[in-house]
Image (cartoon, grey):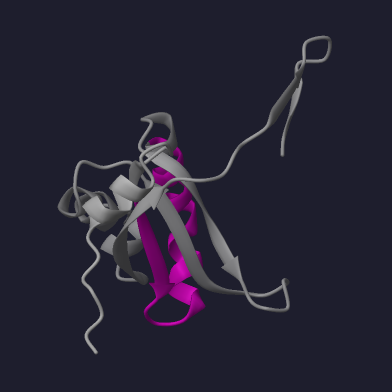
Amino acid sequence: MNEPKITKQDVLNASSEMLNKDLYVVFTKPTNGMIPVMENLEEHLKFQVSLEKKGIMFGAGPFWEDNEIDWNGEGMVIIRANSIEHAKEIASSDPMHKSGARSFTVRPWLLNEGNIQVTLDYSTGKFKLK
């Protein structure tokens, strides 16, 4: 029996009351061990902050090993882009990828569910994200 083909429009129709925000997820992993990753980490982080300040980055960070302590150099970046080609262009301009220290793949992602809670204390100017 053949499975029916489900399209993006089918999902959008089924979730029409939800956010339906198109984003792009960049999965990144080392190509030649951790030494090149660490050598490019400072420039990579500067690049990430520039994406954040431009409003391109939705979120980013490393993937820990299952022991929740060690890092093997893998990470994920969620960005706002006009298309998958645009997202790949943004990802390829990351110094980590330009140097060849890490490779990447990009997947389109539809953000539908979830929430973010921000608590701001006026008296101290401190905030908490939950």
Viewport quadrant of the C terminus: top right
Residue 96 screen position, x and y as percent: 37, 61
Point 72% across, 71% down: residue: 68
Is 25 situated above or below 103? above
Q: Seen in the image, is 90 located left or right of residue 36?
A: left
Point 40% across, 67% down: residue: 28
Q: Is residue 33 magenta?
A: yes
Residue 20 screen position, x and y as percent: 36, 41
Q: Residue furthest bottom?
A: 1
Q: Observer-nearest residue: 101 or 122?
A: 122
Q: Observer-nearest residue: 120 or 114?
A: 114
Point 20% across, 41% down: residue: 82
Is 61 situated above or below 4? above
Q: Which residues are magenta?
A: 24-50
In the figure, residue 62 lies in which quadrant? bottom right
Q: Seen in the image, is 68 located left or right of residue 75?
A: right
In the figure, residue 105 lies in which quadrant? bottom left
Q: Is residue 89 magenta?
A: no
Q: Seen in the image, is 67 located left or right of residue 41?
A: right
Q: Residue furthest left?
A: 85
Q: Observer-nearest residue: 60 or 18?
A: 18
Q: Observer-nearest residue: 41 or 3?
A: 3
Is 127 situated above or below 42? above
Residue 43 screen position, x and y as percent: 42, 51
